[in-house]
Amino acid sequence: MVALRILRNAASRVVFGTRHFQRDVSLLHPFRAASSLSVNPEGVDGRESKDVANAQAMQDLAYRVYELGNDRRWQEALQLFSTVSEPSHQLRFNMLRACTRSFKFKMAWDMFHNLHVREIQAYNLMICMLSKQARHMDQVRGLEQEMRSQSLQPNAITLQCLMASYSHGGDAEGAIRLISESERLGLSHTKGALSCAFAAYCKAGNHLKAREILSQMDNLGFSATSEDLTYLVSSYTKTQDEDGARAAFAELRRRGLQPTCLTYTRLVGCLSGPEALKKAEALLAEMTTEGIQPHLLFFKMVLRAATMSADSADVLKILREMQAR
């Protein structure tokens, strides 16, 4: 490849000409944010047709890597990326995007650290990739701190992905802090952001705030899911509030949603007292009628209920059933 003397300064608008993208996309899904970073040629003499041709070739290559990233074909994207000795900023960014879309964690970190300039879109890509698993929460925290130390302004995508990470990781306070920041910045609520906020309040046991978020979803025309209402059921587990959990379960039914095995598991987790096992067995029979197969976690909750009966025979019966399954 011919050595290139181009493309190092990043901006926040269209890259690949008028035929592809024509507006600021900083609030679009982060996995489509490649088009939001443009690179201005530096030192390219318009009279030097060779340099202009090289610049166009780099743009074409960057766009091809972008397309491969859309299809999660990261190996092919990497092959193209490797043919360039001096990748442009846009090409580096699009390769990072391809890695995050394919959840190639180590490679994504390498690409991220090799960016000469890290805009908010690059942080969005990394945070959204890492937010899928609670075990990456410390890395997400580190990225948030680094981002804020550079005075980068988080956008709706940033806050939603951070909320998702903290919610999945059980950091309800962190998620709620981001909800407040989102409201303070006047950012539009999305279904994903509201679901993250709802889950965070449920995990914190704040039923009042959780129901306020549920009302917001309804007012904005967003449909709550079984997963959302399962969070509401589980929010009563810590206090062993069976009535509250059953009310949340009834709310799920009222909305025409189908409970899952996890929904029933969370409900059994709210049972207490000497009648807990009897109630758990009744829920198991209800599940069976609906064709829902219980999993190991469900039987662990039933076993917990059996220990409250003070009858060792009940415990042995559940253990035998678990072994049989």
Image: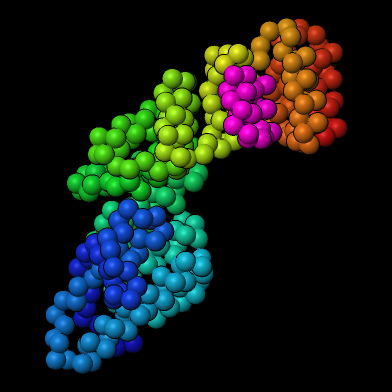
Could you say which is closer to the camera, residue 221 or residue 143? 221
At horizontal 66% and vertical 15% (from top left) the residue drawn is 271
Q: Is residue 320 left or right of residue 220?
A: right
Residue 181, position as x, y percentages in the image: 28, 35
The answer to whether residue 236 is seen in the rendering is yes
Asked if 114 appears above or below 270 in the picture, the reply is: below
Where 306 falls versus 256 (above or below)? above
Residue 237 in percent (x, y) is at 57, 19
Magenta stretch encompasses residue 263: yes
Which of the 4 image quarters holds residue 115? bottom left
Q: Is residue 165 visible?
A: no
Q: Is residue 209 magenta?
A: no
Q: Is residue 1 above or below residue 112?
A: below
Residue at x 29% of width, y 83% of height: 56
Q: Which residues are magenta?
A: 246-268
Rendered image quadrant of residue 270: top right
Q: Is residue 19 above or below residue 317?
A: below
Image coordinates of residue 8 in percent, x first then y, are 22, 71
Residue drawn at the location 35% of the way across and 64% of the way down: 34
Look at the magenta stretch and give its main secondary structure.
helix
